[in-house]
Image: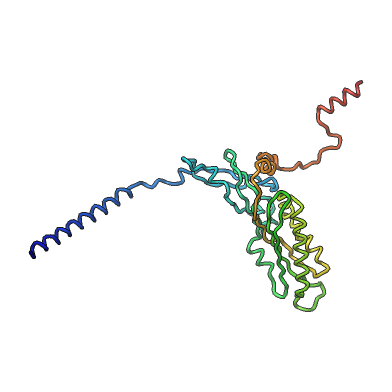
């Protein structure tokens, strides 16, 4: 009996070893696939910025080629890119602003983008914050006339008078509340009465900040009034014609405004011919 049970045990042991062996073998079979370079399957696409900015060709992006149900253009849509405004407008003075663009449409090898947000760079924000000054911040959600809901954040600092002796220039809480109310009012007015592209045009030269500074002068003099952040909270339904308008038909040179204004007496050839014919009669 003893030998029989020993025999059984050894038999079981053999079986267990055999099974394990097969398990390890099976693992090898699937894992022997040679890893190819993933970059061989990728394609480069050009990114086009809206015509608000002077540099239209603003970068490239990488995407895996269309394969089966995974379509490359669908993979690209919704990508958000962060670019420096200095690069977009060829103006080094605007280097402290970063613009976010979102890919909305793909045409051939071009990705057409739309404005998606704006932030100040970290170093700019940090350079503004000082001791002995009051920092005032406000934010507001505004709906533009073309249906975008935009959240604007503004930052401002109190300013010392020229002949001031006192080291600090703190504003009282009531003054701060008044200023904040004024900020919200101005931002709502400036952003709520225009389309998104017009708002972007206002954000670039910081005209809203200047307006706030001007109007709050009577409450407390401010300096460094900046829109520190813009977020797109909600977008309207995608409209390709609007996007094409924004891109000047997606052509590289169509979005740039004419440098010289058209002459007063300029007219098209047809009306010129008619006028000439009338003169002859």
Quadrant of the drawing holding the N terminus = bottom left
Quadrant of the drawing holding the C terminus = top right
Tell me residue 201's x, y (percent): 73, 51
Tell me residue 178's x, y (percent): 78, 69
Question: Residue drawn at (11%, 63%), measured in percent from left and top?
Answer: 5
Horizontal relation, residue 276 to residue 206: left or right? right
Is 134 in front, or is 224? 134
- Write down the quadrant of residue 125 in the picture: bottom right
Relative to 147, say whether 177 is above or below: below
Question: Residue drawn at (18%, 56%), measured in percent from left and top?
Answer: 15
Horizontal relation, residue 270 to residue 150: left or right? right
Is 259 in front, or is 38? 38
- Residue situated furthest bottom in the rendering: 166
Here the colouring is rainbow
- Write down the quadrant of residue 168 in the picture: bottom right
Horizontal relation, residue 265 to residue 147: left or right? right
Question: Residue drawn at (75%, 67%), measured in percent from left and top?
Answer: 180
């Amino acid at each position: 009996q003893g030998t029989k049970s020993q025999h059984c045990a050894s038999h079981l042991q053999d079986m267990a070893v055999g099974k394990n062996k097969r398990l390890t073998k099976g693992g090898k079979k699937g894992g022997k696939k040679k890893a190819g370079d993933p970059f061989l399957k990728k394609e480069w696409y050009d990114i086009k910025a809206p015509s608000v900015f002077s540099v239209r060709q603003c970068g490239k992006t990488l995407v895996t080629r269309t394969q089966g149900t995974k379509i490359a253009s669908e993979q690209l849509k919704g990508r958000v890119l962060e670019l420096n405004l200095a690069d977009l407008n060829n103006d080094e003075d605007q280097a402290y602003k970063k613009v976010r663009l979102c890919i909305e449409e793909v045409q051939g090898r071009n990705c057409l983008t739309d404005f998606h947000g704006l932030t100040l760079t970290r170093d700019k924000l940090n350079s503004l914050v000082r001791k002995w000054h009051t920092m005032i911040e406000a934010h507001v959600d505004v709906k533009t006339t073309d249906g975008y809901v935009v959240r604007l954040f503004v930052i401002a600092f109190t300013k010392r008078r020229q002949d001031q002796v006192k080291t600090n220039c703190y504003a009282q809480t009531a003054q701060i509340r008044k200023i904040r109310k004024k900020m919200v009012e101005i931002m709502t007015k400036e952003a709520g009465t225009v389309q998104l592209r017009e708002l972007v045009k206002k954000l670039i030269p910081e005209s809203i900040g200047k307006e706030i500074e001007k109007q709050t002068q009577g409450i407390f003099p401010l300096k460094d009034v900046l829109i520190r952040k813009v977020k797109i909270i909600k977008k309207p339904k995608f409209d390709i014609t609007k996007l094409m308008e924004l891109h000047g038909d997606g052509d590289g040179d169509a979005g740039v405004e004419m440098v010289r204004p058209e002459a007063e007496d300029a007219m098209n050839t047809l009306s010129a011919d008619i006028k000439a014919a009338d003169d002859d009669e």
